[in-house]
Image (cartoon, rainbow, N blue to C red):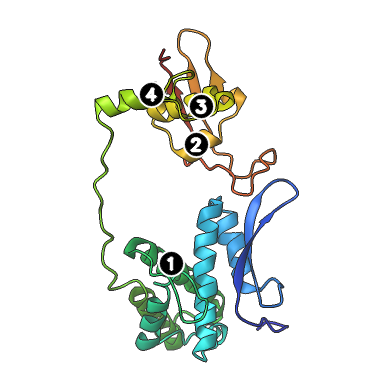
Amino acid sequence: MNLYPEPRPWRVEPHRMPGGENIVSVIDDRGMPVWWPNIYHVFELRNAGKSLTVQKRQMNAIADAYNWAEQVGIDLDGRIENLRFLNYAETKALQARLQLSKTEGENGVVVGNDYWKDRCRAVRNYVEWRARDPLQRIVRANDCYLEAQLRLDRFSESIVAGIGKGKKFKAYGLSDAEQEALLFAAMPGSRSNPFEKQHQFRNFAIVFALYDLGCRAGELLGLKRNDLLLSGSRPLVTIERRQNDPDDPRSRPANAKTLLSIGVQFWV
């Protein structure tokens, strides 16, 4: 039980720590951090090295679940603490609410099925984590434990059930002629170059890196000088994960998903 009120609606706010780490926290209507969601965030998301985007997405879903519960008169913390959870109708109502990505008034933006299911999984994982403490107070051989675990399992299955697969879109690349035209237009001094003269060399390096390396935009934007080894017989570009780089002042820092070394072939 919380020792102080945590008025709704709750929202997720990003923060930059003194050491450069970018994190999020859930705050209440007064701007104060709330208890259980932030404990979960620290132990299960932040300490697990989840990216800032993942942290935001999952904590937004959890905050939305609490806001929905307040609107329909459900004490979500009380239900979890007493191991009652949500019945089937309530679970499906919450699932429908999580399909909306915004909570202002009655309006909301319907998200795709994959994103919707990810939001439902985030809430499921949180409820399962939150239920560990009250479950541990019951002797496993006790029938009450088995009944509570069964109710939790039903909730966990129902919250993600019935969501169809997301649409798959075929990706179309540029033809050989289009690729050649793109590189020619990006070359510094080209008559078809759309960039200002002082930006042409920089932008050509960006376009060519995306073309030749096949890297993501976030990986390219996170490159530093010491990631480039352009001399010798085998030039290399190393892509590193720097999700909490203290030297990156950007509010939306670049993010690389993997560590990768890529050979470079120079194009003139």
Quarter-wise, where is residue 181 in the image? top left
Side (left or right) of 82 relative to 15: left
Callout 3 touching callout 4 (CB < 8 Å)? no
Side (left or right) of 205 relative to 242: left
> Which quarter of the rendered picture does the C terminus lie within?
top left
Nearest to viewer (mark 1 / mark 2)? 2
Q: Amino acid at mark 1?
A: Arg
Callout 3 touching callout 2 (CB < 8 Å)? no
Nearest to viewer (mark 3 / mark 4)? 4
Instruction: In the displayed orientation, state which residue is furthest to the front.
Output: 191
Measured as percent of width and height from the top left, residue 18 is found at: 75, 49
Nearest to viewer (mark 4 / mark 2)? 4
Q: Is residue 129 visible?
A: no
Q: Secondary structure beneath disc 3? A: strand
Give the CA distance from mark 1 to mark 4: 40 Å
Earlier sequence position, callout 1 versus callout 4: 1
Q: Secondary structure beneath disc 1? A: helix
Earlier sequence position, callout 3 versus callout 4: 4
Nearest to viewer (mark 1 / mark 4)? 4
- Residue 149 vs residue 60, the one in the foreground: 60
**Residue picked out by circle 4:** 183
Give the CA distance from mark 1 to mark 2: 25 Å
Q: Amino acid at mark 4?
A: Leu
**Residue picked out by circle 1:** 119
**Residue picked out by circle 2:** 219
